[in-house]
Image: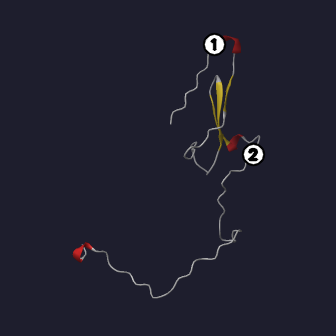
Amino acid sequence: MFADDEPPSYDHEECVSSPTYSTYAGTDERVIRSQPRRLTGCPACEWTFNSKHMKINMGPRVWGLHAPSYGLNGKVEGSIKFSGDRDSVERVTATVRV
């Protein structure tokens, strides 16, 4: 530990200015999109899960992840489609757990 539990001092002899900012990304920079591009008719662009009796769509794939992910207060926009004999269905219950 340091004497008297104080951190070491840091001296900066040179003055470092803030970087220049631009509204456009340079050739060596990347842009993070706040909204993903919405593609239609692209099965690989959405989180879909299929079973014998239903197809669940949990919305667009974002951030290149391997599982659905939603930010704080995020909204899941998707659908559940049932297949088979619709006349025999009495009730459907969907539960979302966080």
Q: Where is residue 35 in the image (x, y as percent from the top left)?
A: 68, 51
In the picture shown, does residue 81 fall above or below 8?
Answer: above
Instruction: State which tag comes first along the sequence, 2 or 1.
Output: 2
Residue drawn 61% across the image and 20% down it: 92
Quadrant in the picture for the N terminus: bottom left
Q: Where is residue 56 in the image (x, y as percent from the top left)?
A: 64, 31
Label 1 CA crowd tier, 10 Å (few <14, some 14–19, many 20+) = few
Instruction: Judge whether residue 85 can be spotted in this image.
Output: no
Kind of residue at disc 1:
Glu
Q: Which of marks 2 and 1 is in front?
A: 1
- Helix, strand or loop under label 2: loop
Q: Can you name the residue that lies furthest to the top here?
A: 88
Q: In which quarter of the image is residue 95?
A: top right
Residue for badge 2: 39
Looking at this view, is 38 or 66 the one in front? 38
Residue for badge 1: 90
